Every structure is written in C-alpha cells, then in structure tokens.
Image (tube, grey):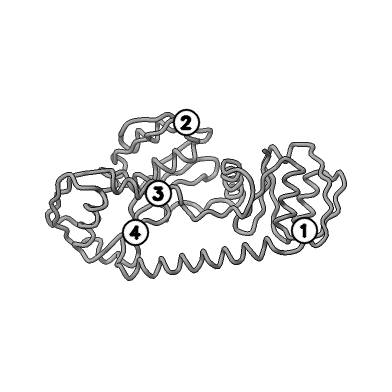
Amino acid sequence: MPCAFAARPLTEAVETLRASSPFPIELERELPSEVLAAPVSLDEAGLDLETALSRVAGAAGLGWALDAARILVGTPERLPPVPEALRIQRCLAQLARDGHGEEWEKPAGLEANAALRARLVSVTLDVSFRQAPLTEALAHFRGAGGVAIQLAPGAAGQADAPVTVELRQRPLGIALRAVVEAVGLDFDVREGRLLVDFRSGLEASAARDAKERSARSERLRAFLAQPITVDWREKPLREAAAELSRTLGVPVVLDEEAWLRETRVTLLARELDLRSTLDLLARNSRTAWGVLEGRVGLVAR
C-alpha cells in the first residue's frame, strides 16, 4: 500500500506511487512544467492505490485512468475512457468496502466533497496577484492549496482576464472567492473538485445534476420493485447469477472471490420484489449486493 509523504513535486510523488503499483505509472507528455512541479502530498498511509492516485492527481488538477496495462496520469479531457470491466470492478470494490446491499448509489464524490469543503476552511494561504491572468491565479491555488480546480467551458473566455488581489493568511475558500469574483465568476464544489464558472452556469449545472439524481433514484426504485420469480434448489451461485441476469435483462456480476466459491443457493420466490429477492440471495450465499447504473453486483462477505 502507498505510504504517506510530505509535499513534493508531482513527478516525485508519482515516482513514490510507482513502488506500490502493479502497473507502470506514466505522466501525460504534454503536461506543462508548472503542473509537473506542483507540490502534492499524501497525508494518510495505508490507502489503496486507487484512492492514493486520485488524491495525488486531484491535488494537481489532474485525473488518472488504466490504459493498456499502464496507469496514465493527465488532464481529465485527454484521458482514455475507463473500460466497462474496470468500472464494474471498481463498483464491486466500493460495494465490498461499504458493506451490504440496499440501493447502493451514493452521490458522486460524496466523501471527497466533504473533505474538500473542510479544506476550504482549514487551509490558509497568502495570495498576491497584480494583473495576473486568471489561469495563473488558479494554478497557484492548485499548488499552494492542494485542490483540484476546473474552469468551466462556459467561462473559458475569462481565462486570461487580469486579476489583482492581495491577501495574507486567509482561508482558502475566502481567498479563491475573492480572486474569481474579481473577474465576475464564482465557484462551487463538484465531485471532489472546485468548478469555476459564472453564477448562472453553476446554478444551471446544479439544477441539471439534481434533476438527474432524482431521475436515477426513481429508476432505481422502479428497478428494485419489479416482481421476480425464482425456484433454485442447490443451484451454483454462478448459475443463479446468470439466470437472474437473463430475467432482469441487465448484467449481474460477481467479484472474484464470490465467483470462485462453490456456493450453492436454495431460494423459492414467487412474484417477490427484486430488493427482497436480492436480500434473500445475499443471505443464502454469504454475499452483499448493490446496484449501480443498472448493474447488479454480488461480492463475497
């Protein structure tokens, strides 16, 4: 597992993580020198590699992805899409950490958002900008504040707007707000990063997110309420999962341990709602269940 380390340039931080990675870790070739030199730290030891990568890359305003048996750290828009198999694997890994079933669909970046909001209050810093381009000012906050900041596409026209702000030992959130408001912008916490945009843009995107969350919750409730009939007598878990997948018309995936177990399940259910059926299946097979993006995951307990 990755060890904790004090602030160091991004290049050195990535080199430290390589020692704990089963895959080579590479930095995007086109990253500017100021990003490569940005100081990042890892305050907590014993994290899994995925979490450590997310924190280190996020502190420099970057993301990461597994691509062709290597881990690539770079700007989010240039990263390759995450393969479906890996997305399911991450879903199951998270489900195993979170415990047992229910409609497992946390708001995106819930824990990261809470940590970021705390950082906006607890971290203090100096800022001294005289006619500095907004992008330069935001880069300062990424490095000195250790936070991920994204300038929304709708505010791209303000990227070179000059900023003049002088503050001493102010909380990160107050200092950042003074900078972005100087060019008519605002910011909000979104999925573990700070999104800088016009206030109207932030309000519009927040409304879209809320509408999508509501729609997802409604779809999830309907999905879990559908009636299921099964008649399994000492059926291998893998076969039961395959049959359930055919019945539901969605993937039902098992983690490696659940797949390798020679577990057999006995379950008789007639027109029982899916939620209750999954609860009984999990109890009989020593698994936990969860649903994400229309997929059902079963992991060993």
Are circles 1 and 2 on residues that touch, CB within 8 Å?
A: no
Mark earlier in primary sequence (1, 2): 2
As shown in the figure, which amino acid type bears the numbered disc 1? Arg
> Which of the numbered marks, if any, corresponds to residue 114?
3
Mark earlier in primary sequence (2, 3): 2
Mark earlier in primary sequence (4, 2): 2
As shown in the figure, which amino acid type bears the numbered disc 2? Gly
Foreground label between 1 and 3: 3
Which quarter of the figure is the C terminus placed in? top right
Q: Is residue 18 left or right of residue 35?
A: right
> Which of the numbered marks, if any, corresponds to residue 246?
1
Q: What is the x, y in percent for residue 127?
A: 17, 48
Q: Residue at x 31, y 41 (%)?
A: 36
Foreground label between 3 and 4: 3
> Which of the numbered marks, if any, corresponds to residue 188?
4
How many neighbours does mark 3 have within 10 angstroms: few (below 14), some (14-19), or many (20 or more)?
Answer: few
How many neighbours does mark 2 have within 10 angstroms: few (below 14), some (14-19), or many (20 or more)?
Answer: few
User: Element under label 2?
Assistant: loop
User: Element under label 1?
Assistant: helix
Q: Is residue 211 above or below residue 39?
A: below
Q: CA distance from mark 4 to mark 2?
A: 30 Å
As shown in the figure, which amino acid type bears the numbered disc 3? Ala
Q: Residue at x 25, y 61 (%)?
A: 159
